[in-house]
Each structure stands twice: as C-alpha cells, then as structure tokens.
Image (cartoon, rainbow, N blue to C red):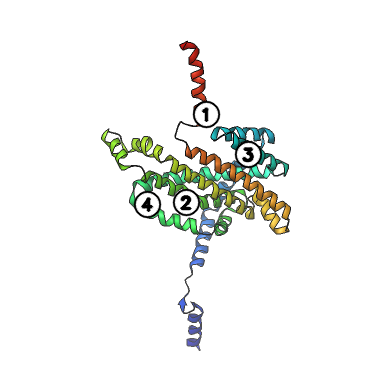
Amino acid sequence: MSAVLNADVLNAEKVHGVPRIPLGDKIVEGVDWIIANFGDFLDRVGRNIEDTVNSFTDLLLTPAPLVMVAILALLAWLAKDWKFALGSVVGLVLVIGMDQWENTMATASLVVSATVVALVIGIPIGILAARFGKVSAVVKPVMDFMQTMPALVWLVPVVMLFGAGVHAGLVATVIFALAPGVRFTELGIRQVDAEVVEAGHAFGATPRQILREVQLPLAMPTVMAGVNQVIMLSLSMAVIAGMVGGGGLGGDVVGAIANLEVGLGFEAGLSVVVLAIFLDRITASAGSRRPGHGRLKTLRTKFSKGERQPAAA
C-alpha cells in the first residue's frame, strides 16, 4: 500500500513525464522572506516615494492650466521650433477641454519621476558595462530578462512588496523602463572612435577626464535616444500601473475598461497620446542638438552680438 502511495506522489510531481520545477514556490518563499525582514523599511520607502510624486504633481498643478500650457509651449519652442510649440498648445488645450488636465499632470509626474530614477541607476551601469567587459557580460542577460518579461508580471511582486498605490506604480515603471538607459549608454560609449580616445590618452588625460570630456559628449546623441526610450516605456507602464492604484490617466483607462465607458477611455487615451508626443519630441530634439548649440544658446549669441555692435561702432 505504501509503495502505491509513494508512486502516486512521484507521478503527481511530474508534468508530462518531466519532474516539476517548483520555481514559483521558491519565488513566493523569497518574497515572503523579504516582507518578513524588510517590510517596515519597504513601507517607509513606499510612503516617501508617494509623497515625492504627489508633491511633484502638486507643483505641476500649481499654475493655472493655461499658464502651464504657455510654459510648456515655450519649452517646446526652445527645444525645437514654433510649429512644435503651436502643436503643443493645441494638444494641451484639448486635454484641458476634455477635463483630463489633472490626470495628465499626475501621469507626467509619475513618468518624469520614474525616468529620473531609471536614468540615475541606468547610466552609471551603462558606463561600467562599456568600460569593463565582465560587467557587460553580467548586465546583458539581466537587461534581456527585464525587457522581455511582460509588463503586467512586474506588478505582482511589486504590489506584494510595496502594496497598491502610486509608489507601486513608480517602482514597476522603473524596473520596466530601466534597460534602454543601460543599453544605449553602453552602446554610445562603445561607438566613440578609438582614435579619439587614444588621442586623449596621448595628451595625458586621465580615464575620468576622457569619459567626462570625450566619450560622454560624443555619445550624447545615443544616450539621449536611450532617454527617449526610457520615457516612452515609462509612459506605457504608467498607464498599466493604473491597475494597482497608480492613478492619473492609467486609472481612467482601467476604469473605462471595467465599466465599458468608451468615451472616457478615448479621452484618457487621447491625453496619453498628447503627453507621449510632447515628451518624445522634447527628448528627440535635445538628442539631435550638439551640446551647447540649442535654441537658447542661439538667442544668447544673437543678443550678445546686438549688444556689441553699438560699442564697435
């Protein structure tokens, strides 16, 4: 009888003839261990994250909506041209008219906060990966894993560790959007012409000086392309984070799906499009300009020439 029971147990532990691998059980045990030992710390971190994001949202909502539209339009003009500025005004006024301004600013706050955190973590890792082959060999499979894992999957462990709310949305967004910052930084530095780097060494520059004054400036267009990708991934994940109480436009999208409100879903989705286009064009314009050659620099040059002309006369 016992032999029969043991055989049943062994058969139950096999899936199509293959022994079952209890990976999920081990992950649950690991998450439970983290919660038991670091639960209070994670709660404090979550509260601080939520307070920071909410404070940034309040800052964006402090000016009147039309005043904020004017500020963003000025930023668009400085970053690119008057056509982009005019298009930004039209899109942002449309967002105000759809009564999605507060949600759009909340989503923008979450996206910008997550982007800053992802870049603060990702760019140094990318620099280390570019300089040390062993670091690159370790980082690449980790980045592959983070990029290919479905976005919704990241919400599960994050909610278990931090609970539902804005802070959970930000943590999941950072994890999901981190990889492009690392990859593009490493790629940009590796693409710098080796002869330029050798010239720096020949003039007695230290490795830190070469990185700061040669490699990073030359790699900046590629790094900014990575920043652009981080922002776009952050925006997509910020909408998904509405499922765990992330708020903003994501909350309206999730609510529209739950209640089958087509109008609300379309308005929230169109607001996401406006915000995505604005952020995409801003970062793309910044990446296409050489350092110190933006529109603001041009205006300063013209103003300085205008001041010097009477003195020369």
Q: Which residue is mark 1?
A: 296
Q: Residue at x 44, y 47 (%)?
A: 184
In the picture provided, is 298 more to the left or to the right than 240? Answer: left
Q: Earlier in the sequence, mark 2 or mark 4?
A: 4
| Spot occupied by residue 60 in the image (x, y as percentages of width and height) | 63, 37
Above or below — where is 114 with respect to 289? below
- Quick one: SS at disc 4? helix
Q: Earlier in the sequence, mark 3 or mark 2?
A: 3
Above or below — where is 204 with respect to 151? above
Query: What's the CA distance linking mark 3 and mark 1?
Result: 20 Å
Q: Which residue is mark 3?
A: 87
Residue situated in front as seen by the camera: 83 or 166: 83
Query: What's the CA distance linking mark 1 and mark 2?
Result: 31 Å
Disc nearest the viewer among 1 and 4: 1
Which circle marks residue 179 in the picture? 2
Q: Earlier in the sequence, mark 3 or mark 4?
A: 3
Q: Residue at x 48, y 39 (%)?
A: 288
Residue flagged by tag 4: what amino acid is it?
Answer: Ser
Query: What's the CA distance linking mark 1 and mark 4?
Result: 37 Å
Q: Are marks 3 and 4 in contact (CB under 8 Å)?
A: no
Disc nearest the viewer among 3 and 4: 3
**Badge 2: how crowded within 10 Å, few (<14), some, or many (20+)?**
many
Residue flagged by tag 2: what amino acid is it?
Answer: Ala
Residue flagged by tag 1: what amino acid is it?
Answer: Leu
Query: What's the CA distance linking mark 2 and mark 4?
Result: 13 Å
Q: Which residue is mark 4?
A: 136
Disc nearest the viewer among 1 and 2: 1
Query: What's the CA distance linking mark 3 and mark 2?
Result: 31 Å
Disc nearest the viewer among 3 and 2: 3
